[in-house]
Amino acid sequence: MPDRPRYDTYLTKGDCFDLSLIYKANGSAVDLTGYSAQMAIAWSYERGPAKVITNGSLILSGTIVAAEGKISFHATSAQTGALPKISKADYQVRITDPGGCLSTILYGNLSVYKSDFEVV
């Protein structure tokens, strides 16, 4: 089985976040008519003196331009601003075909930077 493509990226808390991709097979854009897409951003961090592990996630729905094979994701500044004080997360992008079959097509690390505009 071939490896899924990996792409590491970043966001700054409190800023909008956008990620777009063209889904291709054999060098040609795949027609995504009838497909849906989601991006899951997941994190884990230690909290408090007892160092309790806390997990969380943010799920973004994708916008698809079917004939171009284009998938775009957007997180608002409120969504990124609500992230806990973390420095890294992981993400996965998956598509659902018209028959309901799920395929993870991209993954990577997501660095999360503190905004200098945040109240300390």
Image (tube, grey):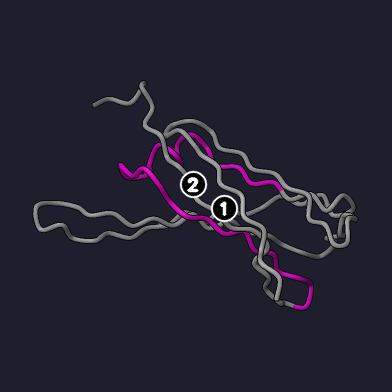
**Which residue is found at the position 61% from the left and 49% from the top?**
7
User: Which is more toward the observer, 97 or 4?
Assistant: 4
Residue numbers of the magenta segment: 72-99
Q: Indicate the position of residue 80 as horizontal and vertical percent values.
A: 45, 40
Q: Indicate the position of residue 116 as horizontal and vertical percent values.
A: 36, 22
Residue topped by disc 2: 110
The secondary structure type at the circle numbered 2 is strand
| Residue type marked 2 | Leu
| Residue type marked 1 | Leu
Quick one: label 2, few (<14), some, or many (20+) residues within 10 Å?
some
**Which residue is found at the position 36% from the left and 21% from the top?**
117
Q: Which mark is residue 28?
A: none
Residue 84 relative to residue 75: left or right: left
Which quadrant of the figure contains the N terminus? bottom right
**Which residue is found at the position 49% from the left and 30% from the top?**
15
Precedes in sequence: disc 1 or disc 2: 1
Q: Would you identify the image quadrant in which residue 29 lies?
A: bottom right
Inspect the magenta stretch and tell me whether residue 73 lies in it.
yes
Q: Indicate the position of residue 25 as horizontal and vertical percent values.
A: 85, 62
The secondary structure type at the circle numbered 1 is strand
Residue 83 relative to residue 1: left or right: left
Q: Nearer the viewer, mark 1 or mark 2?
A: 2
User: Which is more toward the observer, 21 or 56?
Assistant: 21
Extreme left residue here? 49
Q: Which mark is residue 60?
A: 1
**Which residue is found at the position 83% from the left and 57% from the top?**
24
